[in-house]
Image: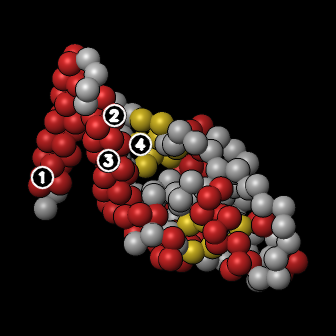
Amino acid sequence: MTYPFRTKTPKRTCTVSKSDYKYYKNELATDFYHHCGYTNCIDTWFGGQRTFQIDHFKPVNKYSNLKNEYSNLVYCCSYVNRAKSDDDSPNYIDPCESDYNKHFERDDTGAMIGKTPQGLYMVKNLHLNLQRFSIIWTLERLTNLINRLKAIRNSRQEEVKDTLIELEDMYFEYSQYLFKNQ
């Protein structure tokens, strides 16, 4: 089974001009729903907003005029920001300009799979196949399921039962995957 890469596409909404791109971090975190623009991993499991970085989609060393342009900034984890560095390949897809679900999907373990040439390029060059991204995706899914259980705790029993079964299946499938690969 495969899963969509993400359910919410980030949108750059800040219209205020700032003197230094670093001052946009709060706006970027909000616009990217506190998720890495490239991996869609939530910043919580990395240590929060303070550990996330700001990527220049078009590298500053080649496009110095875009250094402080909000439209060129991407909220992302340090792993991807370092891997991308100054790479200016046309194969990179702006997280706000394209539906990433057309280019990526996830398998049962949370591993990212490229579906297009651009997606395959990004998985390879940004190391999107690191197990840490699969684990964080799974942790977020578990958290969402637990929150669903909390929300329906006093509702229909059948809905609770179905959600518990889904949670249990997901947990045991993923734990088997982790232990098998150690």
Indicate the amino acid at tag 2: Ala
Does residue 162 appear in this view? Answer: no
Query: Which residue has dot 1 on it?
Result: 180
Q: Earlier in the sequence, mark 3 or mark 2?
A: 3
Helix, strand or loop at disc 4?
A: strand
Q: Compute the Cα span from label 3 to label 1.
A: 23 Å
Contact check, label 4 and label 2, Cβ < 8 Å? no
Residue 134 appears at what percent x and percent y? 34, 54
Residue 2 higher or lower than 175, as above or below: above
Which quadrant is home to the N terminus?
A: top left
Indicate the amino acid at tag 4: Arg
Q: Compute the Cα span from label 4 to label 2.
A: 26 Å
Q: Compute the Cα span from label 1 to label 2.
A: 34 Å
Query: Which residue has dot 3 on it?
Result: 143
Q: Compute the Cα span from label 3 to label 4.
A: 17 Å
Check residue 151 in the rendering and tell me which mark sits there, or answer none.
Answer: 2
Q: Earlier in the sequence, mark 3 or mark 4?
A: 4
Q: Residues within 10 Å of mark 1 (few under 14, many from 20)?
A: few
Contact check, label 3 and label 1, Cβ < 8 Å? no
Q: Earlier in the sequence, mark 3 or mark 1?
A: 3
Indicate the amino acid at tag 1: Lys
* Residue in the picture at 58% in, 42% down: 8
Query: Which residue has dot 4 on it?
Result: 106
